[in-house]
Every structure is written in C-alpha cells, then in structure tokens.
Amino acid sequence: MSAGELPIAETFVSIQGEGKLAGVPSWFVRVSGCNLRCAWCDTPYASWRPEGPTRLVEDLVAEARGSGVRHAVVTGGEPMVFAPVAALCAELAGAGLHVTIETAGTIDRPVHADLMSISPKLRNSTPTAARARELGGPGAEGWAERHERARINPAALQGLLDRHPERQLKFVVSAEPRRDLEEIDAVLTGLTGWSAGDVLLMPEGVTEPAPEHRAGVVRICVERGWRYCPRLHIALFGNRRGT
Ligand code: SF4
C-alpha cells in the first residue's frame, strides 16, 4: 500500500445516524482494519475480518466531490491506524467538504477534522476468548487480552481533545448503563478541556434499544447534562450495510 492508498470496506451516501450531526446527508468512507476487536462491533467486515480493496486517496476524494453532499464521514474500522488518512481528510477539506472522523481514540495523529467524533471503548466492549473465536475464527482468542490492554489510551484521548475544538465523546453503554457510569467518570476525570455538551451516551445494540434501556440512558443524560445519542440509521434502515 502506497502513501496515497487506503484499504476501503465500503463507501456510500446516507444520513449521519449518530452524534451531533445526526440527520445530515453525508458521504461515508469506511476504512477497513482496526486495532481493537469489540465484542459487539457492528462492522466486523472492517475489524474482525477486514475486507475490501485498496483505493487511491485521489479517487476517493473525486467520488466524495461528485456525491452531491457537503459532509464527509471518515469511519472504520479505525481510520487513525492508517497514515494516509491525513491526506484523505486534508483533500476532502480542500474540496470544500465538512470532515468528520470517527475514532475509538486510541491513536492520535495530526489530521484535519471539522468534527472529531471520539468513542472510547468501555469494559463492556471487551470480548471473551469464546466470543473472539466466534467472530475472528481459530486463533483470534488472543484479542480478548489485546483489546482490553489497548482500548483506553488517555494520552491519545487528551491529544485528540487538545487538537480538535469541535469534538464529541460518544460512549456506548450496555443494557445496565449505571454499571458503565463509574468507568465513564474515571475516563472523563482523567481528561481536561471537555464540557458536558461534548458527552453523548449511546445504547449498545444493532436493533432499536428496549424501552427500559433507553429510559435508563435518558435518566443519566438528564442528571449529568449529557446528550442521548440515537442510532438514527438503525431506526430508519435496520442493521444494513451501506446505510
Ligand atoms: S473500535 Fe469500532 S470498528 Fe473497531 S472493533 Fe470496535 S466497534 Fe468495531
């Protein structure tokens, strides 16, 4: 892979489903490959079993430019693993597109992002060895420990916050969200420069969350002044690729 190429699982035009820009028509590019392996990953074809061709940055930018929408979302997998993502984001911005990067926040590198969407992975994301084998095949068991070691990188999180005044911190919370709260507080306590308006809680799942799950997350958001983060694309289209 050359300096101007990236492994790409898919590109598509849809609406942004999550976060501060939910509902905004966007061109998505899903970089294939990730340094984590979440137990509930909703894009295993870009993490557990990465697929897709290598594509030139200039071709991707031409596609985005011709898409007819003004927002680009660089997602994954984990786009920050790949150095050429910096060129991609710079060229998308140069073409006049608003650029969102979606990252788990374990890697910091100088990149242009009009919105840095950071989703630190909590303990609820760590797979058991059996789940790792189920998703990654024989030999994937080691990801249980690798994921747990790598999922929170306070220095990278702080670097991303320091570099990007427009950001969001999006936490995926389990069906028992109060169990995750202590860990969220521990992560946030170790970081500076964020405000309550940057923090979003999103119920885990690839279907619409149960009413009691939603209600539990809403209660925490009201108490803390955080935002509830829907998965609009799931509500509109279900768990389908290319949406
Ligand atoms: S960080 Fe994102 S892409 Fe990577 S395994 Fe977790 S959910 Fe999947």
Image (cartoon, grey):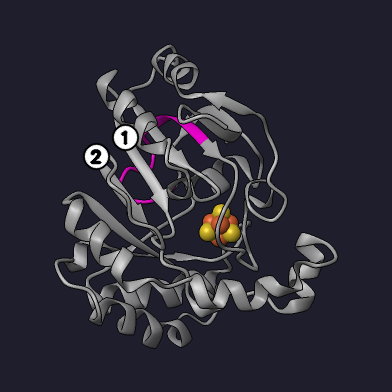
Q: Which mark is residue 99?
A: 1
Please give the name of the residue rendered at 63% of the width and 53% of the height, measured from the top-left corner. Answer: 47
Point 42% across, 41% down: residue:
83
- Mark 2 or 1 closer to N-term? 1
Confirm or deny contact between disc 2 and disc 1 (CB under 8 A).
yes
Q: Is residue 19 magenta?
A: yes
The stretch in magenta equals: 18-29
Dot 2 lies on which element?
loop
Is the N terminus in the top left, top right, bottom left or bottom right quadrant? top right
Q: For mark 1, does the 10 Å Cα neighbourhood hold few (<14), some (14 to 19), or many (20 or more) residues?
A: many
Local crowd size for mark 2, using a 10 Å CA cut-off: few (<14), some (14–19), many (≥20): some
x and y, in percent, of residue 219 in the image: 35, 77
* 39 in relation to 128, above or below: above
Check the picture and name the quadrant holding the C terminus.
top right
Task: Return the residue found at the far right.
Answer: 138
172 or 100, nearer to the observer: 100
Amino acid type indicated by mark 1: Val
Q: How far separated are the C-alphas under marks 2 and 1?
A: 5 Å
Residue located beneath label 2 in the image: 114
The stretch drawn in magenta includes residue 171:
no
Q: Is residue 160 above or below residue 147?
A: above
**Residue 208 makes an appearance in the image:** no
Please name whichever residue, 157 or 65, is drawn nearer the observer in this view of the structure.
Answer: 157
